[in-house]
Image (spheres, helix red, strand yellow):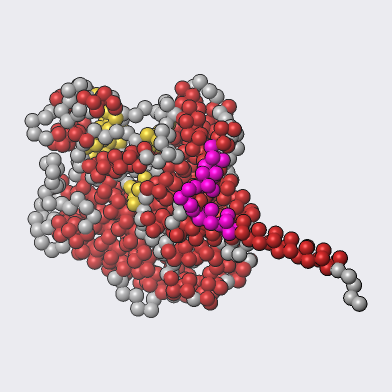
Amino acid sequence: MAAWRVESAVAAAAGDEPALAGAVAAAIVAGASLAIARVAGVSGDDDASTKSTHYDGETYDGLPTVYDIPAIREYWSERPLASARRAGGLVAKLSAWALSVLSDVASGKVETNSRKRAAAMRDLISEQGPAFVKVGQAIAIRPDLLPQAYLDELQKLLDQVAPFGGAEARSTIEASLGDGVTLDDVFEDAATAFAQPVAAASIGQVYKATLRPDAPGVDQSESDAWGRVVAVKVQRPDILGVVTLDLLVIRSLLEAAARIPTGNNALLQQVVQTAEGFIPVLDVAAERFMEELDYGLEANNASRFEADMARTEVVRGAVKVPHVFRGLSGRCVLTQEWVTGRKLTEITADPASGPVRAKLVQTLLNSYMVQFLDTGFLHADPHPGNFMLMPDGRLCILDYGMMTEISQDQRIAFIEYIAHLSAREYDKTLGDLVNLGFVPASLADDPANRAIVVPVLAETLETLYGSGGGITAKTDALNAQSASRVGELSDKLEALAKDYPLQLPPYFVLILRAFGTLEGLGLSVDENYAIVDECFPYVARRMLADDSPRMRAALRSFVYGGGDRLKVSRVRDIATGFREFTNNLGETEQVAAEAAAVVAGRVDPAQSSGGLSGTTKTSAEIDAATRDALALVFSAEGNHLQEILVEEAVRAADSLARNAAAQGWRALGARAPPPA
């Protein structure tokens, strides 16, 4: 499906109608004026600013703490000067960038200067603060909204700002502790611990401190179990005011652009469509970003995630979640146990650490498959800096501000999709995409449309997931398809795209980001890493062990391949996947031990055993896999696998009986006397 590429539309349209440059410039000015008026409102105290949102431990002087655009707009409409000042400054810079694009149009240099303009857009976003960076990062994984040059540049956006002062941090912490409690009451090194942060980001910064043995809000048993050395994350002062105003400005600009009168102008229609496509992306990113500003919610997320990992066999003992000291945490302050180790960014930079990285990637993938398809509670910010290899070999996952939930129905639909993808039943993946909300049901229900879409879908998915490798090789292969049947159907596909636009469901944005990062880590170890292949062992176990009706159908579809005969190769594939997953369970402690040895410097990383797919299995591990398989086959409760095996056994017995009867009949016929 073609992406909305405004630059390309501008270039194509301007070639036939140079006056469009003026129309676009007028649209920009009109949209900017509407946006400023929309943000600023018409009443209120002109002397107010973003710094009116002082936190007193509970409230923010009426400023909404969740993403509620009407409430945020009402708050800032009472502060029109601050609103207009922020919107006006942004519009001035945005207009300068837009005019440079129009200059490229006029000179016919749109494609030539595309990367230059994309880099300028990235720099513009970086200068505007954390809200713009977060939205830019969300858009960076949306090829349906932006050209590739812009996607490449936005993926370089970094969440980096200068730290704020220690006095402000101390004030925020004391406000969170409550009346009558001082920093000296809680921390034995209060005089020095908060002078300089150990890490700083756009939302807050982290300090390392030591609790007093009798610190209020902390039980003795808690400090005994988790230690008294803690990480104290403190939110940046006035961040809520800055973020809410910026999000309001961004949305108001998009709303203004979506309201531009288009007439029959194709370019302006493209501008409106792009703005309309950005709004739901913004809403999802903004809602999650506002949640990140609530450290109390992050504390709840961390506790829930810790419980999820502890109850799941495949990652139990391999994943560490830092303990939260709830008595010393609130909306603006989060206190957790201090965890030591090496960030994954440090390990990936070491060329000799390949085998250890391979096993860490496998542990990470197992953890994310559990989150994605089992618990439905996904850590949605998996950049390498949020993963730490501890001295005991466990993998510590940090930062629970950005999480997403996946419903039970969505989890099952994804398993069905991965099963059909692994079996290369691409015609069935179209129905899966309908279930997941990517395409409308009306497209899949029309036989004529299916005849166009399924061949393209099959060839595209085979290129993307049929083999491993990085995006460059896959992009080249997709481009080469222009001479294939995909190319022959492109005109029909373009026509369908107008009536049935491919949509990226808002809930999927964070999932895509998470697994895109995981695949990138895998490719850093093995250039042929294929994330779908690596996910299949988990899916195989779910299809075999989950006896729900939809899993039964997925299993039957996989092993029969749409026919009425059991496909031996499919049975072999699912058995192999099941065995690999079970053996991975047995490797958890071994992986932790080897990783701990490498961190301690006792073992050369290059001599660490195993790899992504070449790990040597011990006889005990193979026995574990065999035991699990036998437990399934001979389960007293019964399951769909048993039913399939019984059906095939009956069919085989029937076939043998028929063959035996036929042979007996022929033998009798051979001995019968000849006719008289």
Secondary structure character of the magenta stretch overall? helix
At 19% from the left edge and 34% from the top edge, which residue is drawn?
327
From the top left corner, tell me how far across and down residue 632 is, in percent.
Answer: 51, 47
Residue 115 higher or lower than 316, as above or below: below
Q: Position of residue 237 (x, y in %)?
A: 20, 41
- Residue 15 in sight in this render: no
Q: Which residues are magenta?
A: 624-648
340 or 234, nearer to the observer: 340
Would residue 658 be seen by someone viewing this image from the given angle?
yes
> What residue is drawn where x is 43% and y is 71%?
441
Position of residue 305 relative to residue 118, above or below, is above
Please give the count of numbered marks on the rendered protein: 0
Q: Position of residue 16 (x, y in %)?
A: 47, 75
Q: Is residue 462 left or right of residue 108?
A: right
- Residue 128 spot, x, y in % from top left: 29, 49
Viewer-closest of 156 and 107: 156
Classify the position of the C terminus by image quarter.
bottom right
Q: Is residue 630 magenta?
A: yes
Using the rendered view, name the quadrant where residue 331 is placed: top left
Q: Nearer the viewer, residue 593 or 48?
A: 593
The residue positioned 29% from the left and 49% from the top of the image is: 289
Q: Quadrant of residue 225?
A: top left
Q: Is residue 332 above or below residue 262?
A: above
| Residue located 51% across and 62% down the image | 429
Q: Is residue 215 left or right of residue 479?
A: left
Q: Does residue 111 appear left or right of residue 615 in this picture?
A: left
Q: Among all residues in the image, which is located at the extreme bottom?
A: 264
Q: Is residue 226 magenta?
A: no
Q: Residue furthest right?
A: 676
Residue 178 placement, left or right of 613: left
